[in-house]
Image (tube, rainbow, N blue to C red):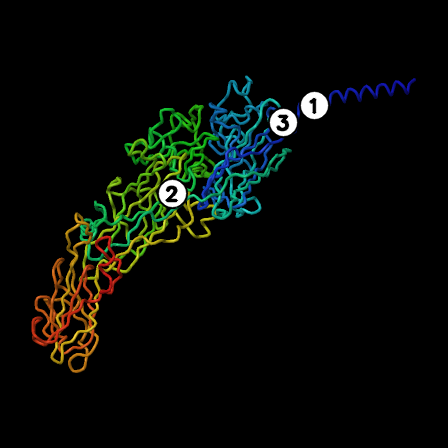
Amino acid sequence: MADFRRLFYALAVLALLAGLSVPVRAQAPPFACTTNVAVPPIVRGEGYTELIGDITLNCTGGIPTPLGQAVPPVNFTVLLNTNITSKLLAGGLYNEALLIVDEPHSAVQTSRPILNCGATLAPDTGGSGPGVCSIISVGNPIATYDGCPGAAVQASEVNGLYTVAPPNCLTAATYGNGRPNVFQGRTGTQQNPNQFNSVTWLGVPLDPPGTTTNRTIRMTNIRADAVFLGVSSTFTTNYVQAQISVNGTTSLSINNPQQIVAFVQKGLIATVGTTDFGFLQCVGQNATGATSAFATGGSTGTAPAQSSGLKVPTYTFTEGFASSWKTKNISFITNTTGNGILQAANSYWTYNQTFPTNYPVDQNQNVPGAIYNTEAGFEYPSGSPGPLLDPVPNPPNGIGTVSVVANTSALSNAYNGTSGTAISGAGIASQGTRLALQLSSIPTGSIVLVPTEVLLTNSNSGFPVPTKFSGVAVLTSTDANGAGSFVASTAGNATTTLVQVPSTGLIVYEILFADPFSIETMTVPMEVAYAANLPQNLPQPGVTAQVAGSFAPFYSTQAAHNPSSTLPVPRFVPGLVPVNLYSISKCACDILFPYVVSAAGYDTGIAIANTSFDPGATFGFGASPQQGSVEFWYYGTGANNAAPPGTQCTNTTSPGTCPGTTVVPAGQVLTYVASSGSSQWGLDNRAAGFVGYVIAQAQFQYCHAFAFIGALGAGPTAQQISEGYLGLILDPGGLTRTTQTSENLVH
């Protein structure tokens, strides 16, 4: 009987324990997070510092930290399959990558303020050093990351659902006061700070949400080196892949820790749009602008279109995908500070067709999860260069539908004086997308003029409004890599204002408005200008100018692949292979006289006609009136059995010497006799006694020639043996003034 009673009591205890254990397990599901990247963007394969999609962890379960206890810290690490190039902000270690908890200042928590670890009201002065904070639990996981500043004494907590002031939020000077919700990353791992493919957030207080709420952890401002991965040459697409690791004192499982965070595609297609290789040395182009620039050393001009029916050389940039070109910050897009105009449906902005070119200061891009389509990331600085203003509404139309309440504190860091970890610089871009042209081999004596402003077009440009454009880019001065602060031309911004390409040949435009929802094109006209200067053989003939296009700033060093505190963001790989743009041909008509004699009782008369003057385009002719000197080369035997010395040029100042200074005008004919020369054209009689052949080069294109051999001293009507023939034109037969192809065929 006693044994039975003992067994009965034992069974009762087991039943009681079993009954108690079921509710405990039901109230404490495992602490777990699911990883996702809501919007893996397309990034430019030419870019070293491409913003990847935000990585988010959606966490549930676990047992929340009890009231008054410190929330357990953990370390978060993200590793990519390429270098992480988020901008370094302090000490070669702390970077701009941010970890944001529970979406403060967003559509989810519109009135929850942003408070970063290390700010004055959330000190990071504990034993783990800068960027590591402690949070004391208020007993309610909803309020753990509510941005409560350490200097505020709370009489109640609406979000926390408690009425007694919690033990934190008492004094700003005490480590653990304040409840920050933004944490700063650092490059590399603890073991290897130079492991550039990783970013780590150390000592982040991680409070399990329990069953009353969930927890969102967002990792933003992560930039990746897409150049290393490159653009696939097959139908597959290369991608940036991330792996997430969490370790610390809290047991946490992560579902889907490996994620695709961006796809790599070609961001820029660039090539010569139009060109012309018909520029002639003897026909000046836009000579007024060219002469002014040469004479005064100035750099501006208002050159008209190319003369003589020639095409203006152009270079065309086209986006590889719709959001490839970006402004520096959202302030450039809005109608309040930038260059946009809000569509009637309030969905997004279009370029303001009054063609503004504003370069405003940045506005805050401080709404977690908002996609701004700018070169800047999550940006909320304090002090220099801020504090900045929020867009109104915030986020702007087309970027978000729920406005947030204005914050009172920006990202700042007070650790170790005023510099700290420089978190205030997070997300800030150095410039918007820049497009560069590198000209080379510009013929001496010529210049190239480009507009200070170029309008962007898309498939809708010109329809239904002929003057409709989708964006604008403005010329800026830069360093040799296309970097530096934006500095517009002193000549002003206009599509009709032209400036001379500098001696370096580098011209750079920055995008000040672009449409992220269409493929845009930018065509840069490059007008060629020069004054004909044949005595000096200028402009230089036979040289082909080339041009290469690319994104800017551009770098080829290994340092560009690594995170940097000094190199600009964004930055790109150097440009494409140079292609031919234009060349200047020597104005010349080359003639062969196969038999010239001024000996043994015979003499030769030569006539060269400058036929570049004709009835004009009205009657179907297309020659350009040209003029130039003529030079002769003698091959054979002259007086005393020697060929005439040197070459002979039309030169009335110093007869016969070269270069020639006397020109044959359009529509006139040069004539001379070998034995006596010609005083009219400045030709001496060095051909007296000559027998052989002569090659002549006229410095004009359209010419015809005739040679007449007769008795020495006799005229063409003398009753003696005589012979005449046409000079043989040695130039290609394609040079014609009409659609016929016979003018310059060999006679």
Q: Distance between the residues labelled 3 and 2?
A: 49 Å
Mark 1 lies on a secondary structure that is helix
Dot 1 crowding, Cα within 10 Å, few <14, some 14–19, many 20+: few
Name which quarter of the figure residue 631 lies in.
bottom left
Q: Nearer the viewer, residue 561 or 604?
A: 604
Residue 542, image x, y percentages: 28, 60
Q: Which of 273 and 667 is in front in this view?
A: 667
* Label pair 2/1, CB-CB below 8 angstroms: no
Q: In this view, does 621 lie to the left or right of 652?
A: right
The amino acid type of the residue labelled 2 equals Thr
Q: Is residue 469 left or right of residue 307?
A: right
Mark 2 lies on a secondary structure that is strand
Q: In which quarter of the image is the N terminus?
A: top right
Which mark is first along the chain, 2 or 3?
3
* Label pair 3/2, CB-CB below 8 angstroms: no
Q: In this view, does 444 lie above or below 684?
A: above
Q: How far apart are marks 2 and 1 (CA)?
A: 62 Å
Residue that label 1 marks: 24
Residue that label 2 marks: 318
Label of residue 607 in the image: none
Which mark is first along the chain, 3 or 1?
1
Q: Is residue 294 visible?
A: yes
Residue that label 3 marks: 61
The amino acid type of the residue labelled 3 equals Gly
Q: Residue furthest right?
A: 1
Nearer the camera: disc 1 or disc 3:
3
